[in-house]
Amino acid sequence: MGEELTTAEQGEVAREFVVGLLDRLRMPAEVAVVELDEELLEVRVSGKELGLLIGPKGQTLSALQELARTVVQRRSAGRTGRLVVDVAGYRQRRREALEQFTRQVAADVIASGVQKVLEPMTAPDRKVVHDTANDIPGVQTISEGEEPRRRVAIQPASLSS
């Protein structure tokens, strides 16, 4: 096993992994590590034509993030912080789009009084939906189903589950 790594050292391990992968793929890009808080690091990849690293619905990006986490965990003997990898601002754009979509669906639910069940989504996407809807008076959310088909239902707040 590895040694105890500081958060900054964990970020550097993740950055080196991503840079090495980009080199092998011959994809020129800039890679930076940003400490979002004392437990959360974000590895930001920026450049042109990076869609291959994002993949359909962010699936390749999720896999890249898991690989980077695994590399950091294997190099570190101690507890590791949380690590997020973002490519070309995809995660921020996805979060904003989900927030807007959730507000629209919530407005429809409030107007119609009928719950709407959303398509299956990843846990981080479901969290965005729950957090956004929880800030809207008149609706509530529940998660239904099992992974990988787990989905969010947005319902009128008066409807009990």
Image (spheres, rainbow, N blue to C red):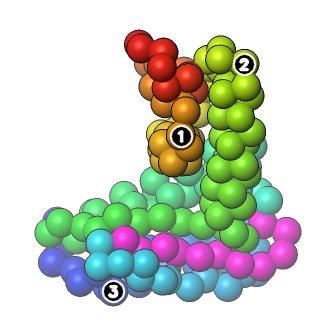
Q: Quadrant of the N terminus?
A: bottom left
Where on the picture, by quarter, is residue 26? bottom right
Q: Residue at x 72, y 70 (%)?
A: 88
- Residue 136: x and y, percent? 56, 43
C-alpha span from label 1 to label 3: 40 Å
Q: Quadrant of the C terminus?
A: top left
Q: Residue at x 15, y 78 (%)?
A: 4
**Residue marked by disc 3:** 8
Q: Which mark is residue 112?
A: 2
Magenta-colored stretch includes residue 93: no
**Residue marked by disc 1:** 137
Q: Relative to 33, is 95 above or below?
A: above
Q: Is residue 134 left or right of residue 22?
A: left
Q: Is residue 48 left or right of residue 136?
A: right
- Residue 107: x and y, percent? 71, 35
Looking at the magenta stretch, what is its main secondary structure? strand
Magenta-colored span: 40-50
Q: Residue at x 56, y 23 (%)?
A: 156
Q: Secondary structure at mark 3?
A: helix
Determine whether label 2 and label 3 are within 8 Å by CB.
no
Q: Nearer the viewer, residue 46 or 127?
A: 127
Q: Earlier in the sequence, mark 1 or mark 3?
A: 3
Q: Earlier in the sequence, mark 2 or mark 3?
A: 3
Q: Secondary structure at mark 1?
A: loop
Q: Which mark is residue 33?
A: none
Which residue extends farthest right?
49
> What amino acid does circle 3 point to?
Ala
